[in-house]
Structure formats: structure tokens, C-alpha cells
Image (cartoon, rainbow, N blue to C red):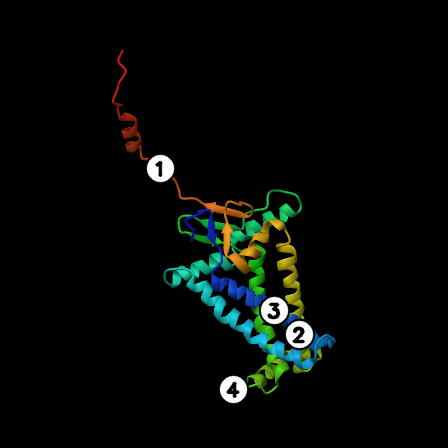
């Protein structure tokens, strides 16, 4: 959507998008810090407080990723199921066009070619065709899997016999671990503890890649402002952005002949 006072400024993120991203970022940072405190015994906070903060951040992260973000994705586009699926595939799934952009990005890193636009805005529909960096589309899938794994492993670290509406979820998770853990010469609980730690290191790695590498370029700091504060993007700044313009109408031969055969009101005679 474009504001009337500046047609080049569009809404990149809605209020719900910004809310989800902020909660996600804060919860993830809290979980990483308190998680390492619980694991390594850092002295800056008591174990009780770290565990309490950890258990507050967990449901916040899961609610955002499993409820709010899916709602934002599928409610942001009009139409039926097919349109919503197509919107999801274009925006969040790594595809052939993203592969081309990623190749161009790698070549640009080695000084060959221009850095391609990864933000594509369609003036006809008034919506983005895509707005994620190609590498982020890959990381999203890995992150979603990692969140599920760290949530499952965290259940048994929190309570071995954890149950939900009478279902012995904790016991089931431990039984599943018994199928894999012996291959690593571990008990099921040891396996889940190690897995939980590995996933934590992955989130640290992802944070470094997402913030410290992909967006270390000052030209993309405008996206930090958009995702945390304004929600707006100025498309007049063409760095990494491309606008799909409406196609010009092609005149038929008859229309061209009609235009050329119009006689002016005054004709110069010999």
C-alpha cells in the first residue's frame, strides 16, 4: 500500500509483522543468554532467575513462530487457498529465481557483476513479489526445524514426566531418544541435552549471519528501521530493490493506422 503524499513509499511490514519480529528477536536473545547461564553457570544472574526468564521466553517464541507469523503470512494476501499458497511460495520458499540471485550475490562478493535486487515490488498488484534475501529463505527452513527440535528437547530437560492433557509427552520423547542415543554412546537425556546445546549454537550462528553479515552493509540498514519501527520502505532508493512497472499497452496495426490518418484542422496546400 502506498501513502498518497509519497507514492514511492510503501508498507513493507504491518504492525503485526513488526510485533512478531520484535518478540521473536527479544525472546531469542533472552533464550540464548539464559540458556548459556543455565548450562555454563555464569555468575551474572541466579539460576532461579535465569530459569524463570527462560520459561517466559519459551512460550513467547513458540507462540510467535507457530501462531502469529503463520497468521501474518496467510492473512496478508486476498484470495483463496491457491493464492495464499502461491504467495507463501514466492515470499518464503527458495526457488529458481532465488538461486539466480544467490549466484549473482556470490559473484558480486568476488567482484564480478552487480549485487542483484532481492526486494521486488509489483506496482500493478500493490504488493511485494518477494522481499527476503535468498540466503534468508534457506535459513528460515532450517530455523523452523531447529525451533521444533529445541522445543522438543527442552521439554524433557524441563521435566522428564511432562504431560499435556494427560498425554505423557515427556515419556514419549525419551522413548524416541532411546532409538537414537545409543548410537552416540549416550542415554536419551544426555542426547537431548547435547542436541539442545547444538541448536543453541545454531541460533547464535544464525544471529551472526542474519545481522552481522547479510545486513552489515549500511545500505540495508533501512530494513532494520522498517522491521522494528516504521514498517515503510522508500522505493526511490533503488539499492537491492526493483519495481515491476505496468506493461505499456501495445497498439494494434489498425490503431496505429487510425492515429496516423488523422488530419489536422489546418492542412498546408501546395
Q: Earlier in the sequence, mark 1 or mark 4?
A: 4
Q: Is residue 139 left or right of residue 40?
A: left
With respect to residue 161, does 255 lie above or below?
above
Question: Label for residue 88?
Answer: none
The quadrant in which the C terminus is found is top left
Q: Of discs 2 and 1, which sits in the foreground?
A: 2
Who is closer to the viewer here, 127 or 219?
219
Q: Residues within 10 Å of mark 4 (few under 14, many from 20)?
A: few
Residue 200, position as x, y percentages in the image: 65, 70
How far apart are the alpha carbons under marks 1 and 3? 52 Å
Tag 4's secondary structure?
Answer: loop
Tag 3's secondary structure?
Answer: helix
State the residue position of label 3: 28
Tag 1's secondary structure?
Answer: loop
How far apart are the alpha carbons under marks 1 and 4? 65 Å
Number of numbered tags placed on the structure image: 4
Q: Earlier in the sequence, mark 2 or mark 1?
A: 2
How far apart are the alpha carbons under marks 2 and 4? 29 Å
**Residue at the spot x=52%, y=53% of the render?**
96
Residue 49, position as x, y percentages in the image: 66, 79
Q: Is residue 84 visible?
A: yes
Q: Residues within 10 Å of mark 3 (few under 14, many from 20)?
A: many
Q: Is residue 238 left or right of residue 110?
A: left
Question: Label for residue 34?
Answer: 2
State the residue position of label 1: 250
| Labels 2 & 3 near each other (Cβ < 8 A) | no
How far apart are the alpha carbons under marks 2 and 3? 10 Å
State the residue position of label 4: 167
Amino acid at each position: 500500500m502506498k501513502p498518497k503524499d509519497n507514492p514511492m513509499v510503501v508498507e513493507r511490514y504491518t504492525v503485526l509483522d513488526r510485533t512478531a519480529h520484535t518478540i521473536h528477536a527479544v525472546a531469542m536473545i533472552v533464550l540464548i543468554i539464559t540458556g548459556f547461564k543455565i548450562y555454563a553457570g555464569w555468575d551474572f544472574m541466579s539460576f532461579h532467575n535465569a530459569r524463570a526468564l527462560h520459561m517466559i521466553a519459551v512460550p513467547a517464541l513458540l507462540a510467535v513462530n507457530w501462531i502469529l507469523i503463520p497468521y501474518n503470512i496467510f492473512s496478508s494476501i486476498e484470495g483463496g487457498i491457491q493464492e495464499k499458497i502461491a504467495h507463501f511460495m514466492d515470499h518464503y520458499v527458495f526457488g529458481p529465481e532465488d538461486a539466480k540471485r544467490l549466484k549473482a550475490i556470490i559473484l558480486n562478493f568476488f567482484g564480478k557483476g552487480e549485487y542483484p535486487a532481492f526486494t521486488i515490488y509489483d506496482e500493478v498488484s500493490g504488493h511485494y513479489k518477494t522481499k527476503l534475501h535468498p540466503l534468508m529463505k534457506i535459513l528460515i527452513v532450517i530455523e523452523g526445524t531447529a525451533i521444533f527440535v529445541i522445543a522438543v528437547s527442552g521439554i524433557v530437560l524441563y521435566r522428564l514426566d511432562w504431560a499435556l492433557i494427560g498425554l505423557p509427552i515427556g515419556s514419549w520423547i525419551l522413548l524416541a531418544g532411546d532409538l537414537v542415543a545409543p548410537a552416540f554412546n549416550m542415554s536419551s537425556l544426555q542426547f537431548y541435552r547435547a542436541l539442545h546445546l547444538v541448536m543453541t549454537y545454531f541460533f547464535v550462528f544464525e544471529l551472526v549471519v542474519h545481522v552481522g553479515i547479510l545486513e552489515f552493509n549500511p545500505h540495508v540498514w533501512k530494513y532494520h528501521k522498517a522491521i522494528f519501527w516504521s514498517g515503510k520502505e522508500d522505493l526511490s532508493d533503488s539499492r537491492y530493490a526493483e519495481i515491476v512497472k505496468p506493461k505499456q499497452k501495445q497498439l494494434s496495426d489498425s490503431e496505429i493506422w487510425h492515429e496516423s490518418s488523422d488530419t489536422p484542422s489546418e492542412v498546408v496546400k501546395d
